[in-house]
Amino acid sequence: MSLARRFIQNLGWLRRSSTLRLTLLLSAIFAVGITIAIFVALLLGENAIERRVDETLRTIASSTVVQDAPEDSPSVIIRAPDDLQGLPTPFQRAVERQSSTIDLNRDFLRSDVWRVLVTQDSQGNAVMVALPLEDSEEAQALLAGILWTTAAFVIALTLAIGFGVGLIAQRRLGRIHDTLNKLAAGELGARTQLERSKDDLDDVAGQLDRTASELERLVTQTRHLSASIAHDLRTPLARLRARLEDLPASDEKCGALEEVSRMTGIFDTIMRVARIEAAQGRDGFEPVPLGPLVHDLAETFGPVIEDSGKQLKLEIRTPATVGADRQMLVQAIANLIQNALVHGGTEITVIADGRTLGVADNGDGVPADQYDEIVKPMVQLDTARSTEGTGLGLALVRAVADRHGAQLTLAPNDPGHEPKGLRITLNFADL
């Protein structure tokens, strides 16, 4: 995996973090709100300045006679409305509107922004009075710059704080997520170890740890109980078998011995499932090439399959090497082959396709709504109750799959035809 791809994956929490999304949402609302507030403040400030200047212009006009008005100066211009000779064109348009703030885009009497008002002089004659707004505009621009800079800084600070809080929260959520994944994979000893109880996330983590501890206790107790029962019953069964062996030969004796052997097999399977489910870590795991494994299985079980009148096929496509306990995989495939021998059709196929290992048959198959049921311990479909079986074969396969973190998949082998058959595979995750 490239560094860029790994970096992108590590930052994948950014789009999943509810804390960061909330921060972005609040920051966006704050940004819109402060933008509107600044625009309103600047607009109201500009209107207030214009009203103040207009009052000043009226005061100047009321104390002046237009015929005696001084010459134009950088501080004030007083003219009759029909005497605008020498003034820039925008002054004419401002006089027509009676009042206006004009921007000349060039200096005129050392200012390019003027406030123009048409009012009355001390004798009631119409007069145009104009004052420069250069200083007011500069003050307004300075105020706008301060406001926009402050807003940008506050928004950036909010995002930075939100990013930091989101990162801290995501790390804690990541530990909770990893703990849940480990528990789902069968590592019942996994804990978050978040015990500070500073907020609701720590409360959730603490509740998860307490729940996991109780779950571990109950599961361990159940496993020990089933394994102990199976172990304790093996001794009476062994004694029973010894006594049956001493009886004279008869059909009843053979039937009884077969039942004892069947019960012993059930208890042995229960104990194997319990040992597999109780195992943790990756002790005993090694690189196992699936191709050679399938060939070894074919050599071992091929004669048995042929003796039963069925045909063994191999489906090998670019087989991979997986980290696994070889003996467990052999047990799982042996159980699948036995299941196909009893319930399948005339063809049994052992599969090694990439990182997938499994067995398929061309029998009647199983209804899709029963897939989850047949992998449970001691569960047999009604159609299978007439044949010999314990209902533990697929339970052991599922235990092996869970032990290896593999996905156990059940599907029709030939979905477009009848009979559909059954295809059961263990799909190993990438290393």
Image: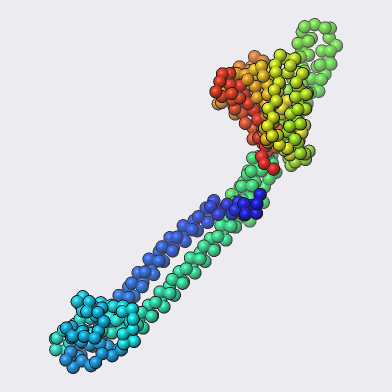
Residue 101 appears at what percent x and percent y? Answer: 28, 77
Report the side of 258 relative to 18 (left or right).
Answer: right
**Image quarter of residue 331:** top right
Residue at (76% x, 11% y) in the render:
255
| Nearer the observer, 103 or 368 | 103
Which quadrant would residue 279 be assigned to in this image?
top right
The residue depicted at 61 percent of the width and 47 percent of the height is 177
Front-most of 347 and 385?
347
Residue 176, can we see it? yes
Measuring from the top left, give residue 50's x and y in whole percent.
29, 78
Q: Residue lying furthest left in this view?
A: 124
Q: Is residue 213 above or below residue 346?
A: below
Residue 209 visible from this viewpoint: no
Quarter of the image with the C terminus in it: top right
Number of marks in the rendered image: 0
Q: Position of residue 280 (x, y in %)?
A: 73, 40
Give left or right: position of 276 versus 74. Answer: right
Question: Residue drawn at (21%, 75%), measured in percent from left and top?
Answer: 97
Please tell me which residue lies in front, 111 or 230: 111
Q: Quadrant of residue 402?
A: top right
